[in-house]
Structures are given as structure tokens and as C-alpha cells.
């Protein structure tokens, strides 16, 4: 992950925000709802373990949208911009840019609609969803989409194996924390089955189902003795593609 998204071990980042509210503003609920609807209508659900009727949904949305899509948009932001905006503001920016990029709305249309609703905050919103779409959203919220798949072979590593974290080429989106690259650890647990990642990260190596491991690292091996509490262990869940056998 790029620096702005993997801050482990960094100092002097300022006070921690202890606000426990899920939504600090009312509009944030709507952004979360838009994201949820997009996931519930995502084309990747046609291959989900849950039998979703995505191909027959009466919707104009014909794209793949997952949590990975949301993260990819955030990770593509300029780091200074990333830290400038609130959490759901970044969601809004990523979702809006996605719809512009995919041709659902033009940038000019988006600006026009934004100005209209700012000037007319009580104006009615577009018509609500069709019953079939509403049913699909509820079904998705109830059952979700598990990444767990049957294991097609034998995991490469066993519990207790010494491993080294790989250092793949940087890509737009990854699930590998940057501070673990090239670090040595021990497989603490081999999770049963295999896990898919709903989008391919290309040369980064994940997408198709593969084993996932809980790997233990000595904190001092990651950040050095001076910056680590003694006898501290860091655990990370890592896809098999991110691990190599230690020499």
C-alpha cells in the first residue's frame, strides 16, 4: 500500500481522533447507501456463492464495484488531498469519479446537478428504486458475498514455516502493507479453504482464490528495537502470492 494508507511505525502523526460515531453528518449515510447499492448491483455477483439474479436486474448499472474499487479510488488520490478530506468525502469523490469515468454522467452534468441541489436543498430526488432492485439490496445486505472458496490444492506453507514477504512492483491497489515488504516472519495459522479477491491487482498477484495465512512478525524486526515494545508480536493476514520461502 502507498504510504498514506499504511502508516504503521510512523511517529508524530498528531492526536488520534476518538470520535466513535459511524456517521458524523447526515449526508454521510447517503454516501454509504450509494456504495452499498453499487455493490449489491455489481456484475461480479453473478459468480457469487449466493445465487443473486444480477444478470436480470432491471438496472442501467453494468459495472463491477467492490470494496476494492473504493480503495483503489482512494489510493489513487494525491496524498496531500487524501489527508485533507474527511472519510466520506473521499468516498464521494471516488464514486463520483467512477461514474464520470464510466460515462454514466459527464463532469459538467455533475457540476450542474450539484449547483441545483445546493440552491434547492428541498427539491425532490429522482424516483426510488424498482421493487426488484430493492429486494436485491436487502438480500445482499442479509447474505453478502463471501470470498471463501474450496481449496484446489495444498497450501504452499505449513504452520511454523519461516517466510519472507515479497516485494512486488507497485500497483494502483494492493493488500500488502508497505512496512512488511522484505520482512521475515513465521506462519502462525493456515486459514482453511482459499480466498478470492474480487478484482485482480495484476502484477501484484491477487485475484484468483488462494490460501491465506496469519503470519507473525517480531515488532523489532519491522521497526527496530528503539521503536518497538519488547516481546511484541505483529500479526498480518497475507495472501499466498505475497509470501516466499525464507532461505
Image: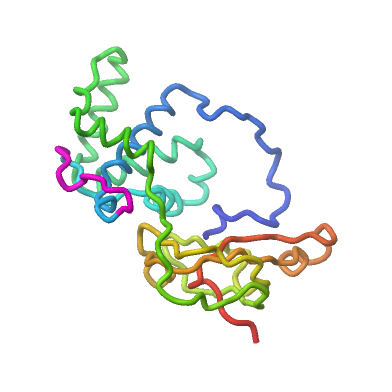
Magenta includes 57?
yes
Task: Tell me what residue is drawn at x 40 percent, y 47 percent.
Answer: 70
Give above or below for 7 relative to 113: below
Magenta includes 79?
no
The x and y percentages for residue 129 are: 21, 28
Decide which of 63, 240 is in the foreground and name it: 240
Pick the quarter of the image with the C terminus.
bottom right
Give above or below for 72 relative to 167: above
Task: Tell me what residue is drawn at x 25 percent, y 44 percent.
Answer: 100
Decide which of 226, 153 is in the foreground and name it: 153
Give above or below for 82 relative to 158: above
Give above or below for 184 relative to 20: below
Q: Main secondary structure of the magenta part?
A: loop
Task: Tell me what residue is drawn at x 34 percent, y 39 percent.
Answer: 140
| Picture quadrant where residue 15 is located | top right
Task: Tell me what residue is drawn at x 33 percent, y 53 percent.
Answer: 49
The x and y percentages for residue 211 are: 49, 68
| Residue 224 relative to residue 207: left or right | right
| Picture quadrant where residue 222 is located | bottom right
Name the colouring of the figure. Answer: rainbow
Q: Which residues are magenta?
A: 48-59
Amino acid at each position: 500500500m502507498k504510504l498514506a494508507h499504511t502508516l504503521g511505525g510512523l511517529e508524530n502523526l498528531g492526536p488520534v481522533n476518538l470520535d466513535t460515531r459511524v456517521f458524523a453528518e447526515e449526508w454521510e449515510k447517503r454516501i454509504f447507501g450509494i456504495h452499498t447499492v453499487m455493490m449489491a448491483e455489481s456484475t461480479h455477483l453473478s459468480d457469487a456463492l449466493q445465487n443473486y439474479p444480477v444478470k436480470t436486474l432491471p438496472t442501467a448499472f453494468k459495472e463491477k464495484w467492490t470494496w476494492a474499487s473504493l480503495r483503489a479510488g482512494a489510493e489513487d488520490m494525491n496524498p496531500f488531498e487524501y489527508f485533507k478530506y474527511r472519510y466520506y468525502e473521499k468516498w464521494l469523490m471516488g464514486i463520483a469519479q467512477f461514474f464520470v469515468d464510466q460515462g454514466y454522467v459527464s463532469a459538467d452534468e455533475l457540476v450542474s446537478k450539484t449547483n441545483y441541489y445546493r440552491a434547492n436543498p428541498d427539491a425532490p430526488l429522482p424516483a426510488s428504486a424498482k421493487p426488484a432492485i430493492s429486494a436485491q439490496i436487502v438480500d445482499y445486505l442479509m447474505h453478502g458475498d463471501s470470498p471463501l472458496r474450496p481449496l484446489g490444492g495444498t497450501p504452499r506453507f505449513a504452520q511454523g514455516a519461516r517466510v519472507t514477504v515479497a516485494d512486488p512492483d507497485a500497483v494502483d491497489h494492493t493488500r500488502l502493507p508497505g512496512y512488511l515488504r522484505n520482512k521475515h516472519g513465521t506462519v502462525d495459522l493456515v486459514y482453511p479453504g482459499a480466498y478470492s479477491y474480487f478484482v485482480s491487482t495484476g502484477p501484484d498477484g491477487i485475484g484468483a482464490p488462494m490460501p491465506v495465512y496469519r503470519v507473525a512478525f517480531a515488532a523489532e524486526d519491522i521497526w527496530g528495537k528503539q521503536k518497538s515494545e519488547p516481546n511484541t508480536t505483529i500479526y498480518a493476514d497475507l495472501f499466498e502470492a505475497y509470501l516466499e520461502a525464507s532461505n
